[in-house]
Image: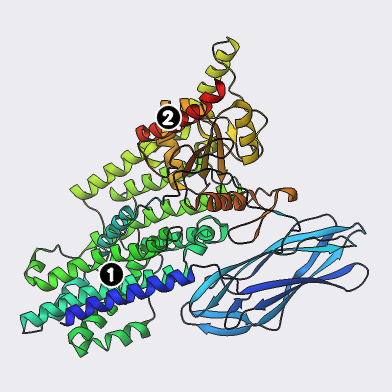
Amino acid sequence: MALKKMFAVLTGVLALLFSVSTLFAQVEEPVKFRFSTEKIDETHVNLIFEAQIEDKWHLYSQYMDFGGPMPLYFSFEELDNYQIIDSVTESPEPHAEYDDVYEMEVKSFTKSAVFTQQIELLNKDAFVVKGYIEGQACIDGMCVPVNSDFAFGLNGAKVETAGDADVEGAAETPLLVKENNFGNAEEKENLIFFFLFAFLGGLLAILTPCVFPMIPMTISFFMKENNKIKARMNAFAFGISIIVIYTLIGSVLAIIFGPSIANWLSTHWIPNILFFLIFMIFAASFFGAFEIVMPSSLVNKSDSKVDKGGILGSFFMALTLVLVSFSCTGPIVGSILVESFGGSILKPIIGMLGFALAFALPFTLLALFPGWLKNLPKSGGWLNTVKVVLGFIEVAFGFKFLSVADQTYHWGLLDRQVYLAIWIVVFAMLGFYLLGKLKFKHDDDVKHIGIGRLGLSLVSFTFVLYMIPGMWGAPLKALSGYLPPITTHYFNIPQIIADNNTQLMKKMGLEEENSACEEPKYKEKLHLPFGLVGYFDYKQAFECAKEQNKPVFIDFTGHGCVNCREMETVVWSDPRVLEHLRNDFVVLAMYVDDKEIKLPEEEWFKSKNDGKIKKTLGEANADIQIVNFNRNAQPYYVLITPDGKVLAEPRGYNLNPDEFVVFLEKGLAEFNKAAAPAKE
């Protein structure tokens, strides 16, 4: 009965969290800004930002130590007409209190706050100071990002808009679709793979020095019970408690970081740089630089309740295990949660469920069958080796987040060659470590190499050799989703040879020019793979399609989209697919996460989805996808006529080239069928 109650509690809690998460998924705007100016003298002006904060919400201050909540940030457009004096001041003084979660003092405002930036006018020309505000507001454990554009008119300049106010006469989200017989079928997210990834993380956590030695100590707790049936019930309760604890962690984070914030978390530079730093900190912990531990008071408080026995004692035994093992499991759990932040609301829950099942499994089985303890290997230096190996993997995968920020904002810091060079060095060092040629302070002396270490070192060095040709442009299909796009590769030998051959054939009259109708906008910053010619602006693409009497191939993509890069490398590279894209369609790549490219003011529009004005190319493309196709996941491929008829059921991530060819040919046949009567 007790076990059934435990299952019922778990089911009820998850059901409640799912219903609450749906409520929280809607867009929250707890902070609104009003903007005004205050003249100090002939050359000095105050820019004033008045924040109105909804009841019970609090807005974090600009000035907090690193590692806490997201501070408020003001960004100003640089102009020759003015210069900023000092920094933004805050009024009144923010409320300061110690936060147990962040273990630091945090500062925040409630109800209202005024922020002031003094500037010096350098001439008497009329001009507008523009910029944006970013921050975080929270209420009862739920946090949402705060974003607002601003504009101040100086020296008589007029400002039509401020913040997210409507632009007078602005058009609404462009409707590309006039006829769609295929609906908007939602493609199921591949959560099974992520569950298996998290499950593997749980198994790895067991092999760390903080966890493995605790197995016999924990099992002895259940062996004290003389009643075998009761002992087994307590063992089941212990395992279920571990699953409940970790799944609750994922559920709470799913509520806080629901779908409404997923795009921001997965594409903005602030969370991606933060995730990069988290991975580096976790790696340093695994290398032995320091330990990440939970507060001892929390561990002691949980441990003191273990002696109560029964189901409750089993729960606190599980909680104590979770807290004590945090220095080793924290980096793995953190990695799983970071990977889940850009996904659906289910992903953190699925990730923690997978991790917890694997983590609880050996403890539960050994508690049920304590005789198996004799077959376990003894603790030793091999446990620290597992930690260090995980540290190298954390370093490698941490750079993925830095790459996303780099691609999204066009910083140009981490192109494909630099990224590959880092991975080659990391995995080469891992191979040397496994051979005993590198040593950390907690490692034992390696007098001889076992079969396991030798096998792993062979895998590591083989992986390094596989990556080396990529430095000269080899596609490396197995890694395509994790590498920056091939278009960032400056010394791509296959592409150089292909371009030279193409130019030679054109000069000989053996190949026709594959040219677009007009010069594509944004081609300096955006690119198509494999030398394809296409557009990044929907108006240009549809006008060209009308002129050439071709259907449009829409590719909703993103700089930080792992699956998009994998689709391009594995599917688009197929000669049949490339042939169709080059000759039969006008290709339109719509980047939904680009933060750098600003639209001219006459192209701004008001979203039919959230009512906000879309001012950047990424915002506009993301909104066009949501409004027209009720989708916000990438990649997403649509075949459509210039007059808005969808020709085949749109497709998402699927690495089968044959099915993609069928998709293209079906759309092309439908287009030709509709065009046939007109030709007659």
Above or below, 262 against 555 in this view is below
Q: Residues within 10 Å of mark 1 (few under 14, many from 20)?
A: some
Residue 624: give x, y in percent of width and height. 58, 50
| Residue 37 visible | yes
Above or below, 32 against 499 in this view is below
Can you tell which quarter of the image residue 337 is in?
bottom left
For the N terminus, the quadrant is bottom left
| Nearer to us in this view, 98 or 658 | 658
- For mark 1, what is the residue? 210
| Nearer to us in this view, 666 or 478 | 666
Three-letter amino acid code at the position of disc 1: Cys
Residue 71: give x, y in percent of width and height. 60, 71
Residue 665's disc number:
2
Looking at the rendered structure, the secondary structure element under dot 1 is loop
Q: Is residue 206 left or right of residue 539?
A: left
| Nearer to us in this view, 483 or 331 | 483
Residue 310's disc number:
none
Q: Is residue 475 left or right of residue 221?
A: right
Point out the residue furthest to the top here: 508
